[in-house]
Amino acid sequence: MKKTLIFCFALFLVFTLTGCKSPSEAAAEKVSEKILEGATGGKVDLDGEKATIKTEDGSVVSFGGNEWPSDKLGEDIPKLNGKVTYVANSDAMCMIIIEGVKAGEFEKYVEKVKDAGFNQNEMNYSDNSTKTYMASNAKDIAFQLTYMVDTEEVSITAGKNEK
């Protein structure tokens, strides 16, 4: 009986310390972190659907999540309303995918991007299925915006140009 009580108490502590994750989920997360650390050479932190990798040179890259980035290169990108489904963000690059954007909202967003300074070396492409806007800004950040007409999905990619 005493062993059963100790076992139950230990399980209670494990559940409390892992933030309502089952022991198998917490263990899988730790194993995944170790595999990614071996592959990337950096320190990996998995938090639900988001992964953050801190490399030996001090740079930090975040993948996943569904919130608009407010730091790193993402802070230079004007916000677009819609359902954010993917984010990858670092000091050197940022990629955001947004669903549920109507064509008119996309056109307004292109103007917002231009007003934010992404208006140098502009290029536009459009056909029946996609609309693309590419430009750079005074900080030498290259910016590409692609709208998929059929799926109402926007892909935003920004990156610092290497010199």
Image (cartoon, rainbow, N blue to C red):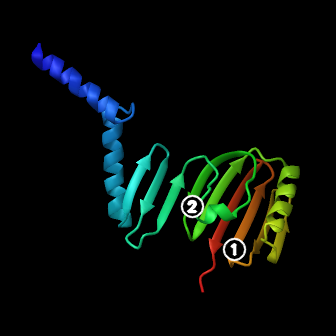
User: In percent of the image, x 50 and y 45: which residue is there?
Assistant: 49
Could you give the CA–CA distance between mark 1 and mark 2, rounded to whole angstroms?
14 Å
Residue 142: mark: 1
For marks 1 and 2, the one nearer the N-term is 2
Q: Could you tell me residue 139's position as x and y percent?
A: 69, 77
Q: Could you tell me residue 116's position as x and y percent?
A: 79, 66
**What secondary structure is marked by label 1?**
strand
**What secondary structure is marked by label 2?**
strand
Q: Nearer the viewer, residue 124 or 73?
A: 73
In which quadrant of the rendered view does residue 35 lie? bottom left
Q: Quadrant of the C terminus?
A: bottom right
Q: Residue furthest bottom?
A: 163
- Whether residue 67 sits left or right of residue 98 in the image: it is left
Q: Is residue 39 above or below residue 86?
A: below
Local packing at callout 1 (Cα closer than 10 Å; few below 14, some 14-19, many 20+) is some
Kind of residue sitting beneath label 1: Ala
The residue identified by callout 2 is: 89
Kind of residue sitting beneath label 2: Asn
User: In percent of the image, x 60 and y 51: which residue is there?
Assistant: 86
User: In percent of the image, x 50 and y 62: which residue is there?
Assistant: 61
Q: Residue furthest top?
A: 1
Local packing at callout 2 (Cα closer than 10 Å; few below 14, some 14-19, many 20+) is many
In which quadrant of the rendered view does residue 91 lie? bottom right
User: In percent of the image, x 82 and y 57: which residue is there?
Assistant: 109
- Whether residue 3 sits left or right of residue 73 in the image: it is left
Q: Nearer the viewer, residue 96 or 140?
A: 140
Q: Is residue 65 above or below residue 155?
A: above
Q: Could you tell me residue 54's position as x and y percent?
A: 42, 63
Q: Could you tell me residue 96's position as x and y percent?
A: 65, 56
Q: Residue furthest left?
A: 2
